Image (cartoon, grey):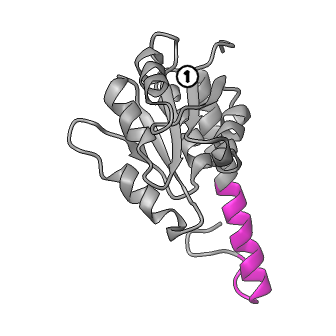
């Protein structure tokens, strides 16, 4: 895999990093190179537009954009880049991120933003990995392995719960 960034992780403020770091960690797990920056839609609109317009030319394949409050960053980036944009609603002090979620998910026709749950940056990172895996057999295999591990973890939790509750050794599907 290349060492040049394939995914951009941007946020409206450095205060969003505690949420957005989970996207970076997910990309690290799959050894997907990324870049991280603050690109505020409201405080640095020219730089935000330049970032979005230049993202594909720099070799990025997807952008993960986190924002709180009015949360215009993901949608504005989607309006100026041909790349897929994944929006992460960042919860703030008030409204628990619902304002951000609604801002990001309610995009007009023709300007799509894939939106994950409030503070769902890990899933944003995993979604970016899946997008890249569509054209990378090695990454597909690693994603399949990851999915198998999730299955094993969930199956084991079921076994432990059944044992704790004094139930059967296996559930209806035999695991």
Identify residue for label 1: 137
Read off the magenta span. Answer: 151-169
In this rendering, the answer to whether 125 lies above or below 98 is above
In this rendering, the answer to whether 151 lies above or below 50 is below
Residue plotted at (66% across, 15% down): 1
Of all residues, the one furthest to the left in this rendering is 109
Q: Nearer the viewer, residue 33 or 144?
A: 33
Q: Nearer the viewer, residue 30 or 52?
A: 52
Location of residue 156 in the rendering, given as x and y in whole percent from the top left corner:
74, 65
Quarter where residue 165 is shown: bottom right
Name the magenta segment's main secondary structure.
Answer: helix
Of all residues, the one furthest to the bottom in this rendering is 166
Residue plotted at (59% across, 66% down): 93
Q: Is residue 95 left or right of residue 107?
A: right
For disc 1, the neighbor class at 10 Å (few under 14, some 14 to 19, many from 20) is few
Residue plotted at (56% across, 27% down): 8
* On-image quarter of the C terminus: bottom right
């Amino acid at each position: 895999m290349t060492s040049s960034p394939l995914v951009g992780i941007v946020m409206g403020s450095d205060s969003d990093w505690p949420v957005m770091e989970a996207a970076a960690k997910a990309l690290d797990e799959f050894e997907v190179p990324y870049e991280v920056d603050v690109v505020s839609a409201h405080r640095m609109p020219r730089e935000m537009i330049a970032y979005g317009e230049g993202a594909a030319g720099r070799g990025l394949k997807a952008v993960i954009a986190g924002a709180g409050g009015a949360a215009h960053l993901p949608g504005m980036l989607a309006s100026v880049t041909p790349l897929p944009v994944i929006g992460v609603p960042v919860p703030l002090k008030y409204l628990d991120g619902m304002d951000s979620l609604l801002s990001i998910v309610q995009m007009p026709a023709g300007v799509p933003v894939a939106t994950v749950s409030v503070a769902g940056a890990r899933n944003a990172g995993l979604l970016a990995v899946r997008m890249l895996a569509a054209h990378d057999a090695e990454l597909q295999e690693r994603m399949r392995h990851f999915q198998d591990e999730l299955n094993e973890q969930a199956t084991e939790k079921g076994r432990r719960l059944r044992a704790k509750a004094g139930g059967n050794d296996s559930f209806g599907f035999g695991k």
